[in-house]
Amino acid sequence: MELQALVAVCLGGWEILEASGGEEALAHLRLRQPDLVLLDSQLEDGSAQQWFPQLRSLFDGPIVWFSSKDPGPDLAGQLAGQIHKPFDPLRLQGQLLNALD
């Protein structure tokens, strides 16, 4: 099962907008503001660190880091949370709800 599909199953009942890269994520954010951004470190068109400033300029809500990699100290301080891969599908929804508080 692809990661996006697994996350969608874990978050059943949530509306999910998927973006394969930073440019697509920015396009989504220009059209609407989600409750939360789940940011994977590996984007098709660059790194999450590269795209983060532009994402943050369009979105002031919680951003959760979703990766096996450490975001680094500069980015970590700007995140609402971190979920490390491999992740526990049974805990994912609760972790994201905590980030929304």
Image (cartoon, rainbow, N blue to C red):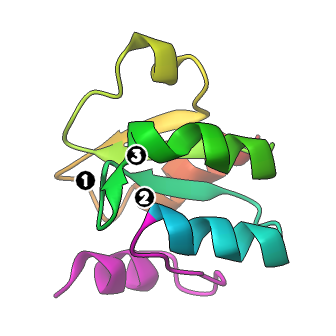
Report which residue position mark 1 lands on: 87
Q: Residue 56 bears which disc, if any?
A: none
Amino acid beneath label 2: Leu
- SS state under label 3: helix
Quick check: 65 left or right of 12? left
Tell me residue 20's x, y (percent).
39, 75
Amino acid beneath label 3: Ala
Q: In this view, does 52 lie above or below 74?
A: below
Tell me residue 68's x, y (percent).
19, 42
Q: What stretch is highlighted in magenta?
A: 1-21
- SS state under label 1: loop
Q: Report which quarter residue 36 is drawn in.
A: bottom right
Q: How far apart are marks 1 and 3 (CA)?
A: 18 Å
Report which residue position mark 2 lands on: 92
- The N terminus, quarter of image: bottom left
Report which residue position mark 3 lands on: 48
Amino acid beneath label 1: Phe
The residue lying toward the viewer, choosing from 66 and 100, is 66
